[in-house]
Amino acid sequence: MRVEEFMSAGAARFEAKAALVVGDTRLSFGELDALANQCGRALRRIGVRRGDRVVAFCDNSVEAVVGIFGALKAGAVFSPVNPTTKPDKLAFILNNCRASAIITQQKQLGTVGEAAAHAPTLRGILVAGDDAAVAKSVCGGVPMFPALAAEEQTAPDDPGIDIDLAMVIYTSGSTGFPKGVMMTHQNIVHAATSITTYLENTPDDIVLSVVPLSFDYGLYQVLMSVKIGMTLVLEKSFAFPQAVLNRLAAVKATGFPLVPTIAALILQNQTIKPGMFPHLRYITNTAAALPPAHILRLAEMFPTTRIYSMYGVTECKRCTYLPPEQLRQRTASVGKAIPNSEAWIVDDKGGPVAPGVVGELVIRGGHVMKGYWENPEATDKALRPGGLPWEKVLYTGDLFRMDDEGYLYFVARKDDIIKTRGEKVSPKEVENVIYQIPGVAEAAVIGVPDAILGMAIKAVVVLVEGAELGEREIIRHCAANLEDFMVPKSVEFRRELPKTGSGKIRRSEVQAEATGTPVVPGS
Amino acid sequence: MPANVETAIRKFIAHSFMYREGVDSLKDTDSLLDKGLIDSTGVLELVFFVESTFGVKVNDDEVLPENLDSIERIASLIQRKLAASPATCVA
């Protein structure tokens, strides 16, 4: 099965039922399918061919959902990109995957225009928004919904088969350059089937999601809702928690995906009383571990709601989940492998470890990626030979331990990626941007514990002699060049940074000072 | 008084958020969310600013876009609060 068949099957089965609600806009399965078909045709018209990459550069919106399914209906591969991405990185992504088209919004046109000027493979830009003249002003942009309205409502021919790529989704790499995770239709169908199985989703579910579609956790809310025939209510942000909680009650949501930062904000809210959300069947958490104290308080606040602690990496979407009935006995655990997959822990030689011993988590299943886009070196590190002669299994790069009954516990990452607000930040990527500032001699970017963000990004900087730079200049430069979640919250100036014998900055030592943890030898 | 409140809000927003995003101009009615100026931690900073500067209490159920998503709305919220307890202004 291909992913866009979720949509056509949903339209056939649930035609008039609400599929997507964004603000005041409400689309049925039939309407959404027709729009996606028209989008597929519009993409074909601007020259998108089977296998081409189409970037979706939008906030949580109707156009993002229509664009993603439209790309699949055209036989293309979609790539969702965080809407706060700045021009240089967007240009990197457009060039890295040699995108043929981009689907975006009027408010993003400044960034898209700058990036598109450096992306020679782009054949077209579909722009959602009210002002056609503005859309056309940037690199031949096409006003999206008028273009769709001119197309037939039937699906384009010959989109492909299920082992074709469906998605290239970029994830932070420790080298500072994002890597494109390649997922086939089979991979996505496998993951979506497994997750909706343990969440016990039915067409009666109403999911409210504030998680960005550029993050696979947010994206899968769309894919799984369409697959099952659920109604998805999309919100653009969690900036105003009370507004989202009011919406949660108003739409009688049955599912509410969280990340730890959202959970922390909910737990601060004084207006929530246990039992206020009787319709809410489940809450999920992933992206980073919830502190056990937060899990227990969430369970008190939502006494009739099942709480799922989960863990995943972009390279296989989701690895494990803890059955909610285990939550009180194993509050710190992220459970076991998701249905129809396997997870185990290995030592440095690849052999299985005993319970209680820390090692790297390995995943086997149909949800494991095909590799990183045109990056065989990184692919070979992540995908290694498995037990069967023809298979590869995923080395997650995360250290875990297991209890006597096989339940898994996250210990630490093997690399230096920082988790903030549920997003992965490569310190190297932030440092590269800081080094662009004249006057910066050395920089180390670290995570400092933060009650809301999990980790807050901090830059520790040494200036060249005589340079006059303040915290504001450095943060401003970062904000102009990095996605919002990567921008340091604070900057500390020092006279020097610790270094190895060969002169390499010992970031791990600076990090260890901040978190009060011992330095890992050899790091 | 209204001009002072709005000036103080504008100064806080410029100092805390606008320099980060390189936004040079902001109308009193512009949405801070749509302009990309605030996220959830920004809203917390904003509430702390309002409470500590004007000596008013913003309840959790008042932390809504209709009360805090533009300079004009924030000023209006503060003025309603101050009118209810005029002696608490410390600005």
Image (cartoon, rainbow, N blue to C red):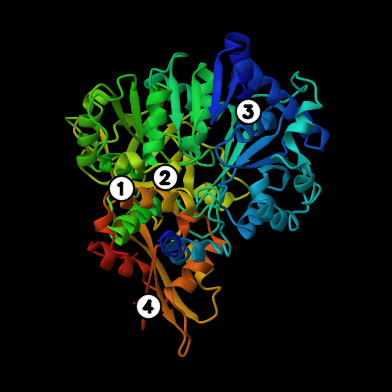
Q: Chain ID for label 4?
A: A
Q: Quadrant of the C terminus of chain A?
A: bottom left
> For the residue marked with disc 1, what is the amino acid?
Val
> For the residue marked with disc 2, what is the amino acid?
Asn
Label 3: which residue? A163
| Marks 1, 4 in one chain | no
In the image, farthest residue toward the left = A329
Viewer-nearest of labels 1 and 3? 1
Q: CA distance from mark 2 to mark 4?
A: 38 Å
Q: Chain ID for label 3?
A: A
The reply to whether callout 1 and callout 2 are in contact (CB within 8 Å) is yes
Residue A313 found in image quarter: top left
Label 4: which residue? A493
**In the rendered image, the vertical position of residue B66 relative to residue A305, given as above or below:** below
Label 2: which residue? B67
Q: Quadrant of the N terminus of chain A?
A: top right
Residue B2 found in image quarter: bottom left
Viewer-nearest of labels 2 and 4? 2
